[in-house]
Image: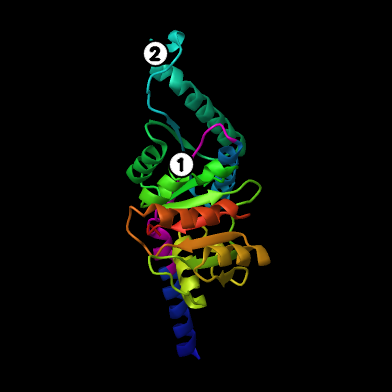
């Protein structure tokens, strides 16, 4: 009996020592997301959801507002300081973003950039080590423009993209996964779960892998993905691009963009950074 008791105590001591060692290990840095903000309702909604997500998971959030480059044409009163006149809307948007973060009790870093919107957002996301870019789902057909922000991010960004529609929280309880690589593939359930666990391991790991997480698989077709999302309640659509290198063709970007445009839930496009 004494020998068994000694073994049990020794085992408990080893487990305790192992636990203490794990607690002593430095925690990996929290992932960072960059939210593109402006004065539209869609952008502010996406920013609000990102703040709520950060409070639940510890995600670090940064916000960027992009000032368009000066191309002439200002009224005479603003000609002596064109940069200041163009930059005023961005300053007001970022001030509002800071106010919203303070009220929510969330941390926030803000940036003001100048240039073409998608280029400035991508450059900042890469420079700051962001794992994800978040934008709002805009209204109207203009959102599908091949020269717009969303198409530019899909075509040229190496960073994952999350499109958030109005009224849809960012959560991952019920995921619809599809693989839309250069060669569309029929994904199977184990592959979908592996992709989701890889994707969310750093972001919302507590929501993936347990009994409360439902991962469904959709065929690699934009129309069938939309039908599958509408048929059953879906919290998140995950589109796996198969780590296709950038830049994407315009046609390829439009395929992804159309899914995100009509989705009632957030759409996460894996660009290879997960």
145 relative to 22, above or below: above
38 left or right, relative to 198: right
Where residue 133 sits: x, y (%)?
45, 47
Q: Are marks 2 and 1 in contact (CB under 8 Å)?
A: no
Position of 33 relative to 120 (above/below): below
The span from disc 2 to disc 1 (Cα, nearest Å) is 27 Å
Q: Quadrant of residue 243?
A: bottom left
Give residue 228's mark. Answer: none
Given residues 46 and 118, the one toward you in this image is: 118
Residue 228 belongs to the span the image colors magenta: no
Relative to 183, 60 lies left or right = right
Give the mark, 2 or 1, whose residue is nearer the N terminus.
2
Within 10 Å of disc 2 (Cα), the crowding (few <14, some 14-19, many 20+) is few
Residue 22 is a magenta residue: yes
Residue 220, placed above or below residue 2: above
User: What is the span of residues highlighted in magenta in the rendered image?
Assistant: 19-40
Viewer-proximal residue among 39 and 228: 228
* Residue under label 1: 148
Q: Is residue 242 left or right of residue 238?
A: left
Q: How is the image coloured?
A: rainbow
Question: Residue at point 60% right, 68% down?
Answer: 213
Residue lying furthest top: 77
Q: Which corner quadrant of the image does residue 78 belong to?
A: top left
Q: Residue furthest bottom?
A: 1
Q: Residue at x 52, y 71 (%)?
A: 219
At horizontal 38% and vertical 51% (from top left) the residue drawn is: 155
In the image, 91: left or right of 232?
A: left
Q: In x, y percent, where is residue 83?
A: 39, 19
Secondary structure state at the residue bearing disc 1: loop
| Disc 2 secondary structure class | loop
Q: Which mark is residue 81?
A: 2
């Amino acid at each position: 009996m004494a020998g068994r008791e000694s073994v049990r105590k020794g085992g408990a001591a080893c487990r305790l020592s192992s636990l203490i060692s794990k607690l002593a290990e430095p925690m990996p840095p929290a992932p960072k997301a960059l939210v593109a903000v402006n004065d539209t309702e869609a952008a502010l909604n996406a920013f609000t959801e990102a703040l709520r997500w950060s409070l639940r998971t510890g995600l670090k959030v940064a916000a960027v507002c992009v000032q368009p480059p000066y191309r002439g044409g200002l009224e005479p009163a603003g000609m002596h300081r064109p940069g200041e006149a163009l930059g005023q809307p961005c300053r007001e948007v970022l001030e509002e973003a800071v106010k919203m973060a303070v009220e929510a009790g969330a941390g926030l870093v803000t940036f003001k950039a100048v240039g073409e919107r998608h280029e400035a957002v991508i450059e900042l996301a890469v420079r700051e080590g962001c794992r994800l870019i978040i934008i709002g789902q805009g209204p109207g057909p203009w959102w599908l423009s091949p020269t717009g922000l969303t198409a530019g991010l899909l075509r040229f960004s190496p960073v994952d993209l999350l499109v958030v529609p109005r009224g849809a929280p960012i959560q991952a309880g019920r995921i619809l996964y599809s693989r839309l690589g250069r060669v569309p593939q029929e994904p199977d359930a184990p592959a979908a779960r592996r992709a989701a666990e890889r994707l969310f391991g750093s972001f919302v790991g507590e929501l993936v892998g347990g009994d409360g997480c439902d991962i469904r698989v959709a065929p690699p077709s934009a129309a069938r993905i939309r039908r599958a999302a509408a048929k059953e309640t879906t919290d998140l659509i995950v589109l796996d691009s198969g780590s296709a290198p950038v830049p994407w063709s315009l046609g390829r970007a439009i395929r992804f963009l159309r899914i995100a445009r009509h989705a009632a839930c957030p759409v996460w496009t894996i660009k290879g950074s997960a």
